[in-house]
Amino acid sequence: MTRAPSIMAKTVSTPLILIAILAAIAIAVDAFGSGPLARTVIEMLIRVVLVVGIWIFVGNSGIISFGHVGFMCLGAYAAAWLTIPPMLKQISLRGLPEFLLENQFPFWPSALAASLLPAVFALILGPVLMRLAGIAASIATFAMLAVINTVYSNWSTVTGGTSSVIGIPTVTDVWIALGMASGAIVIAWLYAISRSGLALRAARDEAIAAQASGVNIERERLIAFVLSAFVCGAAGVLYAHFLGIITPDAFFLTATFVALSMLVVGGINSLSGAVIGVVFISVIIQLLRWMERGVQVGETTVAIPSGAQEIAIGLVMIVILIFRPAGLLGNREIVWTSRREPRVARTQPAE
Amino acid sequence: MTLLAVEGLSVRYGQLTALRDASLMLDEGETLFVTGPNGAGKSTLMKAIAGVVRPAAGCIRLGGRDITGEAPETIARLGFSMVPEGRQVFGELTVDENLRLGAGMRGDRAGAARDLESVFESFPMLKERRDGAAGLLSGGQQQMLVIARALMTRPRLVAIDEPSLGLAPLVIDQVYELLLRLRAERRLTLLVVEQSSTRATMTGGRMMLLRSGRVVLEGDARELNASGAVERAYFGYSDAEEPA
């Protein structure tokens, strides 16, 4: 009697296509690319995990969060605590509890535990934050980021303070990053089609009507917040195991700016937008890096001043916001379909 | 049996008192129209019952249970289904999703699927457009959709705020035809807010007139209208200063 819910039938191809795009990039670079390019691709995949994680909350609830990079920070440091060899930890992180100081855990169990820490943190903090709406909620998430950054910059015996934490095993390769990015996309998609995701998007469109339909907005927001903290935590884990070195400032304003601009450029309301935004901005960043290093034009080398990257990203964002205010993808998802039918309306029809 | 009982309800927005000491009773299966000019407190009354705004004083009972100050979603689950003013469809979701959202919160999937079929029977137009974005429906269709969505919660009472707002007269007729048919088929209890008392007279039922936050008149819609009392109350003439 019940048929498959419409949205599921319509978008089951979306996560598959997005994963296929990322896999194609990874395979191409692995086959033909150089070492530095491979690192760029890993960075891009880590950002996919982060931005998709942010999207789970922001895309469905409509509340811009400036704090999610803080969850990445929690995940990265937790991964460091769990996987740095005990000898090193006993020197640099003496304040850690005994069982952390004396043990070293393998990557996957540690990755899971380290991602759960920000989720638990979000679960504790969420009930307060989720009561706020609109810009007040956004400011509160920013305050959360500032608090995390301040604590991690000063709690020297546990986090090493502002100096780097070193000795994290560098196990993140292209395939692990691709796997985690795929996992993040699948989690985000499953949430989006879930009852909670549906209720949250309804509340984003029309809050009162959603409540009148029996939606507990705070509860649905909290579910999305915790889940997105978990995924952002996983991004932190990947990042820590990619560089092997972390500092609190790697998870602060610059990272937040880049992640949010990726989300905005791609289109904040669709999962495809989140992923495509990351790919698009990553390509631009890579081009700018090459240009900062210098491009041979005839006899002379032309280089743009370093630091031009962020200015350029800012310009790209302005241009996109002027010409495509809803982002590259608008509000649409990429779907495998022959007929073109916009699932999503941008404009209300005339009466 | 009394389904909804409101006693001495007052609502303030800051300094402004939007509703003063309003009381009403609604029996099961009954239809009550709440009318009155702009700013009379009609929507405020509705929102206060639905739990969207907090009353400053008074008591609201639904089926004998005190729901004063409960959260809107709790009140919705207890069977008070509000169709808010201005047709709040979830524009970026499909028609199907809009409807499933109404039922989804109930947590019984088989029952929800049955209700969906029965709603599609009452609204064949929605079935045709089920996979389209709700925001692309016409104004009248959107109004049908929000009514259908309200029905999906299996309400004991459907409260509709200005169903005719911004619709062409012909479309308003369609909406009311549908409401009357639903009332007959499903023996719905209806609470309808409308600015014009004409609809109340045409549809029949009890009517209540609010002005400046007070209940000024209450009774059978047709009788009140015939006696001219509505006109007097609506425009605020006392009997003495009635114009010639």
Image (cartoon, coloured by chain):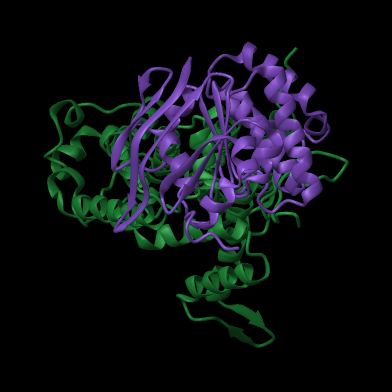
Residue drawn at the location 59% of the way across and 84% of the way down: A302
Kindly give the residue lying farthest to the bottom in the view shown: A299
Q: Quadrant of the C terminus of chain B?
A: bottom right
The image shows residue A345, relative to residue B69, as above or below, that is below
Q: Nearer the viewer, residue A319 or B12?
A: B12
Question: Where residue A92 appears, x then y in whole percent?
Answer: 16, 45
The image shows residue A223, relative to residue A243, as above or below, that is above
Chain A colour in the picture:
green
In the image, taking residue A221 as reference, residue B135 lies left or right, namely right
The image shows residue B126, relative to residue A73, as above or below, that is above
Q: Give the chain ID for the purple colour.
A: B
Question: Where residue A114 appears, x then y in whole percent?
Answer: 34, 33
Res A290 → quadrant:
bottom right
The image shows residue A135, relative to residue A239, as above or below, that is below
Q: Is residue B150 visible?
A: yes
Question: Where residue B71 appears, x then y in whole percent?
Answer: 38, 33
Res A333 → quadrant:
top right
Counting every numbered tag in the picture gives 0
Residue drawn at the location 19% of the way across and 38% of the way down: A89
Q: Is residue A11 visible?
A: no
Residue drawn at the location 48% of the way across and 57% of the way down: A260
In the image, taking residue A193 as reference, residue A309 lies left or right, namely left
Q: Nearer the viewer, residue A326 or A54?
A: A326
Kindly give the residue lying farthest to the right in the view shown: A338
Question: Where residue A130 appears, x then y in whole percent?
Answer: 36, 42
Q: Nearer the viewer, residue B114 or A299?
A: B114
In the image, taking residue B127 as reference, residue A325 lies left or right, namely left
